[in-house]
Amino acid sequence: MAAPYIPQIRLYQQWLHEQRGLQFDSYDALWRWSVTDLDAFWSSLWDYERFESPTPYTAVLTERRMPGARWFTGAQANYAQRVLRHVNAAHAAGHPAIVSEDEQGRVRELRWPELQRQVASVALTLRDMGVQRGDRVAAYLPNVPETIVAFLACASIGAVWSICAPDMGTQAVADRFRQIEPRVLIASDGVFYGGRALDRSGVVQQLREALPTVQRLIALRSPHATTTLPADADFAAASARNDAEVAAFQPEWLPFEHPLWIVYSSGTTGLPKALVHSHGGILMMMAASGKHGDIGKSYEANSFGERFHWYSSTGWVMWNSQVGGLVAGATICLYDGSPAGPKDQPDWGVLWRFAARHRVTYFGAGAAFYANCMKAGVDIAACGDLGAVRALGATGSPLSEEVQRWGTAQFERVGTRDIWWNNISGGTDFCGAFVGGHRELPQVPGRMQCRQLGCAVEAWNEAGEPVIDEVGELVCTQPLPSMPLYLWGDTDGQRYLASYFDVYPGVWRHGDWLKIHADGSCVIYGRSDATINRHGLRLGTSEIYAAVEALPEVLDSMVIDLEYLGRPSWMALFVVLREGATLDEAMQRRIADAIKAAVSPRFIPDAIYQAPEIPRTLSGKKQEVPIKKLFLGQPIDKVVNRDAMANPGCLGWYVEVAARRAG
């Protein structure tokens, strides 16, 4: 009989006792130690995870401030090295690195030594193209093994990776990549999604024209393109080398704070923020999060055969988390396609059957996915043998109590009693989770079990005071290694300060409503700012406005997203039209098409209203947050100061519309 499974956080605590003489009588005590004795906590993770560096670090944290904290001064790291250290042991145990499947049923396995060979081949190809340490490589690729190979190849030579998903509009992608001046573009000429082949060759050509710094294009060929995309190299050839230089290739040692990737988070004004994270910072954050995520090595007896799947597009930070499964030494399972099957024949059992076929042990998805499965009446027991699944992960939006109870009951029918849910909430901004799961704490449906180790998270009231059992502003009062090094192009650091530290200087304000219960469990209630959260993908309103207000008939616009605990995302767009123009069906279609082309079809509004005016402050800012609060049921006089408005007379119209919607 197999030995009982030991959670990763228990193994870590045993090590702390044996190697550091530290014992904690509760998780709360362990957490408080982790957020007060930062040097001891983060150095313990370095030793426990056996980080290597050819040069020792001289200090864990030299400047304890936000922003500007300096971590592990003098140390060196490389993300790709942390992945490839598992090659021999995992391969000897018979486990692949990557299992992938697409909508058309094509299944592929990438063995660990083959992953290593392909990474070396692409890395050497990039070097031959002149890519040097610090150069940016932009990718426009789907969720396939080649994308992970390309990322690891960039990381291995110190190039800085940045990716956008092929479902994003040309303008949205160009607005991101143009900022970072990439030297190489790696792009797919087509994808298959929702039962349809989608040619992307024209978009790629437009991107190349929009990115004057791109010197080389590497094309990932697909059967879905209708024309041949001109390129400097094919990815198949770039990854095909198998010579002595490939065999001898090793990832470069890089300074701990060397940039790893650039991810994007857009706001209410201006271009999307280009957030730069470091090799060392991301690896250390993964080490901390791993105690909560509870993903083990596929080749160790305690977690033998671990197979990790988290459904994501490459445009969501959970793609980065999925790749992190390789850092942990697990097999990762990728699904490239729609989680709901073809658009004309929705099928929410697709991912469950995928998980059954590939013996997934850890299944993650956006909270909206589980809600859709429940609404569609999915019978998980009819989707194949899911007995290997030991954990469910959820994030992206609040998971309601009703949906979690439904999922737990479904797995009881499969034969898994009290399945563990790792409900997490964090952000692209620091590529991590603030609150999440704990394998040994009680589960309360609809809640996250705890604040994560190292994350000094509090809920603050309007007076800036920490509160318990009340909804407050989510803040983090101590630095984390994975907080951005800087925002690309933000030479004076002012945009970084304005994005996270404008309300509480020196304290990270995340933009979520949080309640911390007396038992330490947490509930995220939704965004406290105007950011749109559509099924886990966050977008600043400025990108919607750029698309909509480019139409000659639209004089002004405002968008709100009513995603809140227990409610699905519901997005309303208000438009002010030129005199004589009306919001008929044709106009609504043009608005939707503009958003679809410039941003993504995911951000087409649920409702469009023709408004008399857009409410603005005296300084001209759109009143997105007050109107959002109004539509969530708060009285207008509680959410807006009329004296600070340029046009308070328009508020009556919004009150009437909100009342009609509530009714």
Image: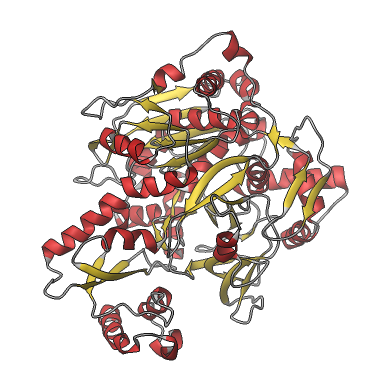
Extreme residue toward the right, this view: 21
Q: How is the image coloured?
A: secondary structure
Left or right side of 284 for 621:
left
Left or right side of 177 for 552:
left
Q: Is residue 368 above or below residue 627?
A: above
Q: Is residue 498 above or below residue 374?
A: below
Please name whichever residue, 107 or 114, is drawn nearer the observer in this view of the structure: 114
Say if residue 351 shows up in the picture: yes
Please name whichever residue, 33 or 460, is drawn nearer the observer in this view of the structure: 460
| Number of numbered tags placed on the structure image | 0
Q: Quadrant of the N terminus?
A: top right
Q: Quadrant of the C terminus?
A: bottom left
**In the image, residue 503 lies at what x, y percent?**
59, 73
Q: Quadrant of residue 347?
A: top left
Q: Quadrant of residue 645?
A: bottom left
Instruction: Please tell me which residue is depicted at 60% across the width and 46% down the height of the picture.
Output: 277
Say if residue 413 shows up in the picture: no
Q: Is residue 62 above or below residue 47?
A: below
Please name whichever residue, 153 or 647, is drawn nearer the observer in this view of the structure: 647
**In the image, residue 619 lies at what x, y percent?**
43, 79
**In the image, residue 338 lies at what x, y percent?**
32, 42
Instruction: Please tell me which residue is depicted at 79% across the width and 46% down the height of the picture.
Output: 43
Left or right side of 476 for 336:
left
Instruction: Please tell me which residue is depicted at 32% across the width and 60% down the height of the picture.
Output: 546
Please name whichever residue, 330 or 550, is drawn nearer the observer in this view of the structure: 550
Q: Is residue 82 above or below residue 443?
A: above
